Amino acid sequence: MIFSTDKNATRRMIRLITGLALLALIVYIAQDLFTWAYSDVPPGHYARKRMAMAAKLRDKLKDHPEDIKAHFDLAELTYNRSEELSEYRIVAALNSKYPHVHERIGDCLLNMKRPEEAMAEYNKMMIDGPSLESCASMRNEYTRTGKTQEAINMYLAAERKDPDTPEYPYEAGLLLVHDGRKNEARAAFKRAILTANRVGKPQPEAQSWLDGLK
């Protein structure tokens, strides 16, 4: 009987400890979700680690305000959109040709619903060297506003700037198809295929489109 009583007490203690542990876990998750719901910070250990790294960079920049890499890294880490834009602009002011800086400013402005300013930054990026991601952002904005020809011109300019990337003529071809300009689209797809074969990056989609336009 004594053994039975002790056994029941042990069970109750295990249930109590399990319940407290579960409650602590729920509170922990709720805190993360509350933070995520009312700020730009996503939940989780990685977010807290990232915020700590950003804080260290802010301290570093107090003593070394000209450290361009620290400014760029802080912009990459922060969850504060205004701080992100400010840091990228500092980088651009220190070195307007710093890799990807105009692309990042454009992305940031686009996320802040400032498309005209974003496009201006993307155009600066095009001078130094395009990227597929930023060209896609520019294409989306151009097509959203009915500027298909500007989107085509942008991809053709990217192709001239970077002739080893078959995606540029391929994307131009898709826009030309949409615009009903089949002959120009065929030429673009052929260039995409030739470039893909030359650099060893197969482009079966371009071939499929070309076959479909015959």
Image (spheres, rainbow, N blue to C red):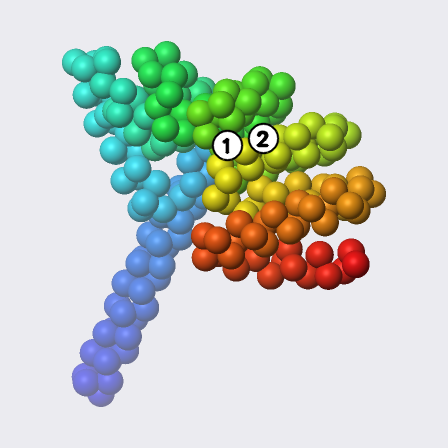
Tags 2 and 1 touching, CB below 8 Å: yes
Q: Secondary structure at mark 1?
A: helix
**Do we see residue 81 in this rendering?**
no
Task: Say which of 86 and 36 sits in front.
Answer: 86
Q: Amino acid at mark 2?
A: Ala
The residue wearing badge 2 is: 157
Task: Say which of 4 and 171 sits in front.
Answer: 171
Which residue is pictured at 62% across the width and 30% down the height? Answer: 154
Which residue is pictured at 46% across the width and 38% down the height? Answer: 36
Mark number, residue 65: none
x and y percent of residue 186 in the render? 72, 49
Left or right side of 159 for 74: left
Which residue is pictured at 44% across the width and 25% down the height? Answer: 128
**In 3D space, how far apart are the residues under numbered discs 2 and 1 (Cα atoms)?**
6 Å
Task: Say which of 75 and 16 sits in front.
Answer: 75
Q: Amino acid at mark 1?
A: Lys
**Which residue, as the protein is rendered here, is positioned at the far bottom?**
1
Q: Quadrant of the N terminus?
A: bottom left
**Do we see residue 46 in this rendering?**
yes
x and y percent of residue 76 in the render? 36, 31
x and y percent of residue 13 in the render? 26, 68
x and y percent of residue 7 in the render? 23, 80
Placement of 79 over or under 29, stated as above or below: above
Q: Quadrant for residue 55, please give it.
A: top left
Q: Quadrant of the C terminus?
A: bottom right
Left or right side of 45 for 174: right
The residue wearing badge 1 is: 161
Which residue is pictured at 21% across the width and 27% down the height? Answer: 56
Q: Residues within 10 Å of mark 2 (few under 14, many from 20)?
A: some
